[in-house]
Image (spheres, rainbow, N blue to C red):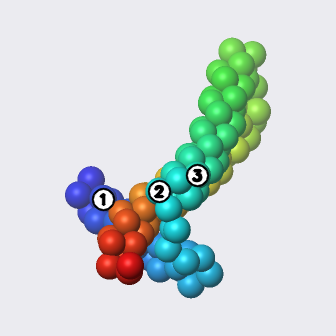
Amino acid sequence: MKEILIEIDRLAAEEMKQANKTHPMFHSDHEGYAVIQEEIDEVIEQNKAAMDCKDLVWEAIKVDYPEGAKNQVEEMRNHLTFAAAEMIQVIAMCDKFIKSQEYRRLIP
């Protein structure tokens, strides 16, 4: 697990670096909060879609439809992969929020 956490931090740092190439530091805490909220909303959407797939897996299992269960698990995996990527973006934007506050303190 430790290695995964280290890799998540590395990916979040890379994501923030890429985001900073096209978007400046947050001008205010309000802006930073709005961006973080938007990213969290995207995580929630992907998680909801994964949960829907989970329910469909169970329905397929109950009617002995292994191909349907497999297809839904594949779809669930895709949604969870996107959710994980979105979570890394949330972490990056949390880091950017903190850095933006530090940046604004240095600039009068």
Q: CA distance from mark 2 to mark 1?
A: 27 Å
Apparent side of residue 85 relative to residue 102 in the rendered image (left or right): right
Which amino acid, by three-letter code, is at mark 3?
Ala
Q: CA distance from mark 3 to mark 1?
A: 26 Å
Of pointers 3 and 1, the one earlier in the residue sequence = 1
Label 3: few (<14), some or many (≥20) within 10 Å? Answer: few
Q: Label 2, secondary structure: give it.
A: helix
Give the camera-side residue of 74 and 81: 81
Q: Which residue is mark 1?
A: 5
The quarter of the picture where residue 106 lies is bottom left
Q: CA distance from mark 3 to mark 2?
A: 9 Å
User: In the orientation shown, which residue stands out farthest toward the left?
Assistant: 2
Apparent side of residue 90 relative to residue 80 in the rendered image (left or right): left
- Between circles 2 and 1, the one closer to the viewer is 2
Q: Position of residue 46 (x, y in %)?
A: 64, 43
Q: Position of residue 27 (x, y in %)?
A: 52, 68
Which amino acid, by three-letter code, is at mark 1?
Leu
Of pointers 2 and 1, the one earlier in the residue sequence = 1
Which disc number belongs to residue 34?
3
- Residue at 33%, 72% in the rendered image: 105
User: In the orientation shown, which residue stands out farthest toward the bottom?
Assistant: 21
Label 2: few (<14), some or many (≥20) within 10 Å? Answer: few
- Residue at 47%, 56% in the rendered image: 29
Examine the rendering and report whether any part of residue 20 can be seen.
yes
Give the camera-side residue of 106 and 38: 106
Give above or below for 18 relative to 80.
below
Which disc number belongs to residue 29?
2
Give the camera-side residue of 24 and 6: 24
